[in-house]
Image (spheres, rainbow, N blue to C red):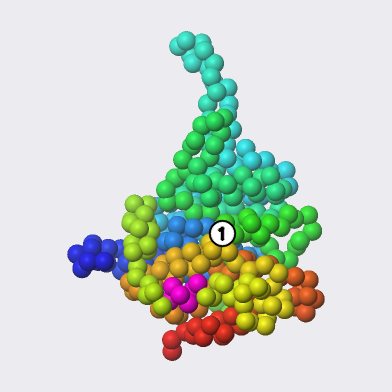
Amino acid sequence: MEAKELERYQALVDKIPNLKREIAKTIVGQEEVIEEIIITLLAAGHCLLEGVPGLAKTLMVKSISDAMELNFKRIQFTPDLMPGDILGTEILEEDHETGKKFFQFNRGPIFANLVLADEINRTPPKTQAALLEAMQEKVVTYGGQLHPLPDPFLIIATQNPIEQAGTYPLPEAQLDRFLLYIKLGYPSEKEELEVLERTTGTYKAETHQIFTGLEIKKLQQLTREVHIDSSLLSQINALIRSTRPAETKVEAVKNYVEWGAGTRAGQALILCAKARALVKGRYSVIPEDIMLLAYPVLRHRLSLHFRAEAENIHPDLIISKILEAQEIHASK
């Protein structure tokens, strides 16, 4: 990238820390989760956010939309939700001048820049598939007509890891459509105390807009221009291939993984590493970007067999073994 081009974008890159600060006015802690959501947005993908109830997932997503010029919609997924409740439906209208009747497409809540798909695993596969198709194609097809979705377009789907009764787990092929699988943990003791103080008193945060939709689109374009060395590309390629039992030398993969990650995982890791570099104010990817993002990129793309569940082996443990074997380490 030429120096003149960098100068044009530098002002936008410099505002990314301001975005984090605005979100922190409402959300205490969870810096890593917020950063990974911003990375998802810059990489023009979608993310799956998993956490127990009461950790302010909805408030977090709403705060992110408030700090940007993004139209926000929330969809509560339930067992009786139909595809038309998400995508929209045609209604019969009448032209008052001619008296002729015609069908008019009434857009659903998915026609927003930032969509929170709350508890996506509580709705049947037919409705899940309708949402995931829109995520991939970024258009809604209804009655043979194409209806483009807004740009930028980000879906953050949530699921509860505790209650699995009456849920419809997403198949692996559909999970693969999510760029990142982000896990939201409990706050620290200090952070939780601050949350309790803020939310039970008179504190009221006022979030200011940092980015417009057009600026987000420019940052998405810039993300793809971030440099990644050919040696790091080779490391990512080797890392992805080592998740496959037939190709790996990692014993944990041979013993516990049924199916490894596909090529899309490598694409996701490269784009996310570029986006993280930009978030950190860099225009070049470093090994740390790859190592830290390997977990949210790969944890939903490894299919473990029954032995892993019986021995309480989780994907993050296997990913750590793969990284050790590849000798990808964060810089000190």
Question: Residue, x 20% and y 68% (percent of image)?
Answer: 3
Question: Residue, x 63% and y 55% (percent of image)?
Answer: 174
Q: Residues within 10 Å of mark 1 (few under 14, many from 20)?
A: many
Q: Which residue is mark 1?
A: 178
Q: Position of residue 19 (x, y in %)?
A: 39, 65
Position of 264 relative to 251 (above/below): above
Is residue 183 visible in this depiction of the protein? no
If the image is split into quadrants, where does the C terminus sit? bottom left
- Residue lying farthest to the top in this orientation: 98
Query: Along the line of sight, which residue is nearer the eye, 112 or 124?
Result: 124
Question: Which residue type does callout 1 highlight?
Answer: Phe
- As helix, strand or loop, the secondary structure at mark 1 comes to loop
Q: Position of residue 184 (x, y in %)?
A: 60, 70
Question: Residue, x 69% and y 73% (percent of image)?
Answer: 257
Q: Main secondary structure of the magenta part?
A: helix
Magenta span of residues: 232-237
Position of 110 relative to 233 (above/below): above
- Residue lying farthest to the left in this orientation: 4
Q: Say how many tags the image has.
A: 1
User: Is 241 on the left or on the right of 43, as rendered?
Assistant: right
Q: Position of residue 189 (x, y in %)?
A: 60, 81
Q: Position of residue 310 (x, y in %)?
A: 80, 76
User: Is 111 on the left or on the right of 76, as rendered?
Assistant: left
